[in-house]
Image: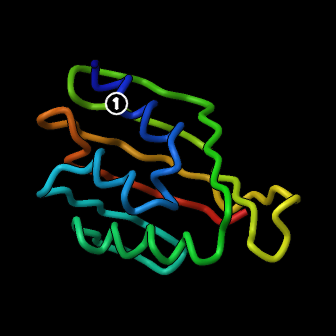
Amino acid sequence: MSAKEIVQKFYKSDALIDSEVIKDFLHPEVLIEWNSSKGLIQLDYNSILNLSNELSKAYVRSKVRISHIVSENDTISVRYSHFVKTIENPREEMLLAHFMVIWQIKDNKLFRGYQMSQLS
C-alpha cells in the first residue's frame, strides 16, 4: 500500500473516535505537532489514544471530507473538514473544524504529523 493510500484509509476509517482502530495506523514512535486554537499541542502515541477515547465519549460518528491530498514519496499533505454526530443529536451532522496536515509515513504507519486546525 502506498503512503497516500495509508493516509486515505486512515481518514476513511473511524480511527479518530475509535482507539482500537487508530492503533492499527500509528507508528509506536508517532508524534504530532498540532497548531490549534489553544496553541501548540504535541501528541505522542498514548496522548493520541487518549484523545480518540475522549472524542468517542462525545461523538457517535466521525466523517472526514478530504478536499486536497498531495503525495511525495513518504510524505502526504491533506486538507480536510471533520464532521461529527453528537451523542445528544445523532441525526445531525456538525462541522467540527477544518484541518491541514502533513504526514510522514514510516514502516507503513503514521510517524510524524504537522497539523493546523481552525474551528468551524
Q: Secondary structure at mark 1?
A: helix
Tell me what residue is drawn at x 54 percent, y 60 percent. Answer: 117
Horizontal side of 98 relative to 1 (left or right) equals right
Tell me what residue is drawn at x 33 percent, y 67 percent. Answer: 48
How many marks the image carries: the answer is 1
Q: Place residue 52 in its image quadrant.
A: bottom left
Tell me what residue is drawn at x 50 percent, y 77 percent. Answer: 54
Badge 1 amino acid: Ile
Q: Residues within 10 Å of mark 1 (few under 14, many from 20)?
A: some
Residue holding disc 1? 6
Residue 49 in the image: state x and y as whole percent. Answer: 34, 68
Q: Place residue 119 in its image quadrant.
A: bottom right
Residue 78 in the image: state x and y as whole percent. Answer: 47, 36
Residue 27 in the image: state x and y as whole percent. Answer: 17, 49
**Nearer to us in this view, 43 or 62:** 62
**Nearer to us in this view, 96 or 72:** 96
Tell me what residue is drawn at x 75 percent, y 61 percent. Answer: 85
**Nearer to us in this view, 45 or 33:** 45
